[in-house]
Image (cartoon, helix red, strand yellow):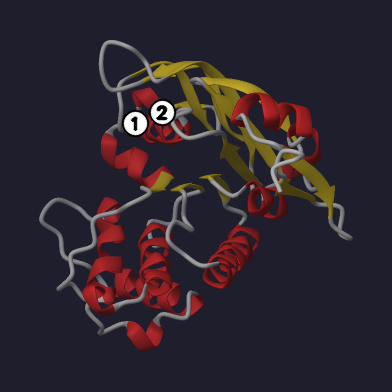
Amino acid sequence: MTATQAATALSLHDVSAGYGAEPVVTHVSLEARRGRWLAIVGPNGAGKSTVLKAVAGLVPRRGTVLLDGTDTGRLPRKDLARRIGYAPQNPALPERLTVTDYVLLGRAPHLGTLARESASDVSVVEDALTRLDLHELAGRRLGTLSGGEAQRAVLARVLVQRTPLLLLDEPTTGLDIGHAQTLLERLDQLRREDETTVVTTLHDLTIAAQYADELVLIDRGGVVAAGTPSQVLTTERLREHYAADVEVLTTAGGNPVVVPVRPAGTR
């Protein structure tokens, strides 16, 4: 492990956040190391998406969020957008906008008031389209894309912000296993090439275990476990927090695989 990887990029200290009088998540503390991949997992309604929104400054929160030691609560909105790239689970995709024009929107935090995109901004977009195999789709309208192509366009828009931290909420939503794997492989390659810190929510525990360096398990709005995938994904813990009958197996590469098991005597 390099010194860069060992350094803490993101820290949450006693963060509570939500949308109304009652917070969705309470007293959440976690850390993500620079250049590493942290996956937030947990059952439906646990508060995973709210944690990402709290980091991105999109919901009211209490507590402290530090990015490379800087309190994000003290940063102007535009500065925050230069440091944090965020993609929601179901982003709005204007159907008539072309892929290039949509991805170019990600350069907005780097533009001055009323300024137009420069040749440098266009170059950044072209680079992202090439790296995500979207160059041949550059002129296509978003409404004509497949699910996998649209997800890559969303990722490209976030990448062109050129931020040290990416927050991706369920980036494989709606994708079959092949397209999900392709997207995650590309994301992991970009993470390693750019030394970007990646924080995702992921529904599929087996996929989370294969791609993330560390997991944080959230249930009922609080952190209940954190560590490596093997440390977090235990049969007893998943039975308790997911109310699921599962077995946790291990691949030849040492990664946990979560397998649902029907109760004895049901068949």
Numbered disc 2: secondary structure: helix
Residue 1 placement, left or right of 151: right
Percent coordinates x, y for residue 61 in the rendering: 36, 19
Estimate the x, y position of residue 227 in percent, counting from the top left: 74, 32
Q: Which residue is mark 2?
A: 72
- In the picture of the structure, the residue carrying the numbered disc 1 is 57
Front-most of 91 and 220? 220
Q: Nearer the viewer, mark 1 or mark 2?
A: 1
Q: Amino acid at mark 1?
A: Gly
Counting from the top left corner in percent of width and height, residue 199 is at: 54, 43
Q: For the residue carrying disc 2, how many other residues have a C-alpha within 10 Å: few (<14), some (14-19), or many (20+)?
A: many
Mark with earlier residue (1, 2): 1
What is the quadrant of residue 136 in the picture? bottom left
Q: Position of residue 5 (x, y in %)?
A: 72, 45
Q: Is disc 1 surrounded by few (<14), some (14 to 19) or many (20+) residues within 10 Å?
A: some
Instruction: Give the residue displayed 62% in from the left and 55% down from the top.
Output: 195
Closest to the observer: 174 or 167? 174
Residue depicted at 44% across the width and 76% down the height: 127
User: Quick check: can you spot residue 4?
Assistant: no
* 74 relative to 163 in the view: left or right: left
Q: Residue at x 78, y 42 (%)?
A: 247
User: Do callouts 1 and 2 mark residues in contact (Cβ within 8 Å)?
Assistant: yes
The residue closer to the viewer here, 170 or 98, is 170
Amino acid type of the residue tagged 2 in the rendering:
Thr
66 or 61: which is nearer to us?
61
Secondary structure of residue under mark 1: loop
Q: Is residue 50 above or below residue 92?
A: above
